[in-house]
Image: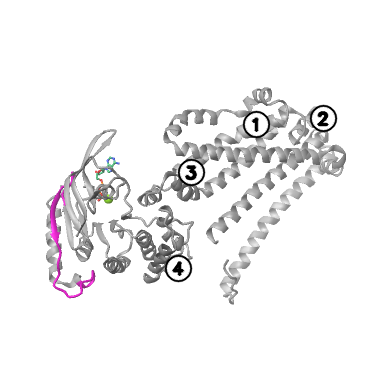
Amino acid sequence: MSRKITPTLSPQRRLYLKTEKRRRQRVLFTQIGILVLFIGWWEIAARVGLIDSFIFSQPSRILDTYLNMAQNGLLTHIGVTVFETLTGFLLGAVTGTVLAVLLWWSPFASKVSEPYLVVLNSLPKIALGPIIIIIAGAGTRAIVVMALAISLIVTVLEMLGGFHRTDPEFIRMAETFGASRAQIFFKIVFPYNVSTLFNSLKINIGLSLVGVIAGEFLVSKAGLGYLIVYGGQVFKLDLVMASVIILSVVAALMYEAVSLLQKLTVSRIEHS
Amino acid sequence: MEVLRIDHIEQTYQAKNGEVAALKDISFHIDKGQFFSLVGPSGCGKSTLMSIIAGLLTPSGGQVLIGGEPVTGISPRIGYMLQKDNLLEWRTIRQNVLFGLEIRHQLTEKNIDHADQLLKTYGLYEFRDKYPSQISGGMRQRAALIRTLAVCPDILLLDEAFSALDYQTRLEVTEDVYQILKREQVTTLMVTHDIPECISMSDFVVILTARPATVREILPITFDIPTRTPLSCRNSPQFSAYFDHIWRELECHEP
Ligand SMILES: Nc1ncnc2c1ncn2[C@@H]1O[C@H](COP(=O)(O)OP(=O)(O)OP(=O)(O)O)[C@@H](O)[C@H]1O
Ligand SMILES: [Mg+2]
């Protein structure tokens, strides 16, 4: 950790820092302003009948839904979705990375699997939904499998690509000391790809959520995805809107959690 | 005493679009503590020969003997330093320097002490906890050399190990390295494209022909100066004679 030294700043530096700060504040102010204006306009438009609040809902009614959270079980549904997403995410990340390691280990297997991976990657996994439900049963298991199906191949491709892009000169250097394949992996290839791993985790957390929502649409038992489908069917659009907003907050929080983990890991590696 | 013998080495590469003959009947030998340079037209097969000596590549013909024993696979008696320093950016300088020992499962107290001693002697000890990106190119190259020397090789192979450095740093580093190698009594074989560099450091210069490479000449380099260093011998009148000689030998083989 570098100690903060506060020398007397030159006038130019102070001016620069001040302009920088003001610029950041302006951006933030505008961002918040747009949100406030949008919500305000939505509310007013609904009240004066410019838009049909039955279809588009309206901020005050969405707020009501949140306030009645205890009755409509919103919290439980959030919990279910978060749990399923994290399970699918962890399974996808671990299985995908392990598969990528195995394929890196055996160039033959890697070559053989190439066309299969390409096809599986471009296949819309949601199409497998009915099959997954038949095999895994219409429940949490099917939903997690759905999340896994969506994130797994991407992880394998992403990680394997990263492993193959490892600077060959580093590997050659390790070979001059007689490094084994395991040593090359653990001491060169894996540390070289820590950032690849985090990038793939960031993509994965979003994909798992997509898988879980799609799974909940199909299984229709619990979770935000279920709530959205249910709300749509009984024309409770407030519930749909409330769920969609929560969903985006959940997605953003999960992404930020991975980013934070990445920052902590990277700063540990670089300044331990 | 003979340490390294290159015995009728041949190498033909098999590629999709045909065969490439890289080395043809290469033979020479190096005694303990001697400094040999390998020069030749670009693409003639110098790196190929180094890889074969290091045991990274099995030759199509002939053999390499170290202390009388044939090389099969990577030999623990050889230290091979590549053109790029290849310091791992996620490790500190000290962790980088210990990398070779770690790979060979030789992280004993004695070996670690020796590595620390090398760091001290060559002015890197106070930078031991820095990361490669935080030190200069010359220091990085020295750290890479110490990593190679830390495993106590009998023979050091340098493949254009200094060519990534700017001229000023290069002169300083070669001066340092020369002192290090003479002090540690390391037998060295160096590939270079820089004729002055090979004259200033070598006891013998092996001149190769264009591909497929054969040995054209093995030129002994001697100076009538009491304490020879790479910089001091550059002023000797013999220096330019050697330069002209090697230059002509190489030139008449360029297409
Ligand atoms: N793995 C390989 N497969 C096929 N041909 C190769 C292979 N490696 C090298 N060659 C060929 O063998 C010849 C010698 O290559 P090498 O790298 O040993 O030359 P070099 O003398 O080190 O060249 P430079 O001066 O550029 O460093 C070149 O023509 C090269 O194209
Ligand atoms: Mg070369």
Q: In this rendered view, identify the residue nearer to me: B164 or B174.
A: B174
Q: CA distance from mark 4 to mark 1?
A: 51 Å
Q: The disc numbered 2 marks a residue on which chain? A: A
**Residue where numbered disc 4 is placed:** B127
Q: Which mark is drawn over residue A146? A: 1
Q: CA distance from mark 3 to mark 1?
A: 25 Å
Query: Are circles 3 and 4 on residues that touch, CB within 8 Å?
Result: no
- For residue B228: magenta? yes
Residue B105 coordinates in the image, percent (x, y): 43, 54
Q: CA distance from mark 3 to mark 4?
A: 31 Å
Query: Would you call the spot at circle 3 few (<14 residues within 10 Å), some (14-19), or many (20 or more)?
Result: some
Nearer the N terminus, badge 3 or badge 1? 1
> In front of the other: label 3 or label 4?
4
**Residue where numbered disc 2 is placed:** A235
Q: Which mark is drawn over residue A162? A: 3
Task: Establish if B112 lies above or below B103.
Answer: below
User: Hey, what amino acid is under mark 1?
Assistant: Met
- For residue A33: magenta? no
User: Hey, what amino acid is under mark 2?
Assistant: Phe
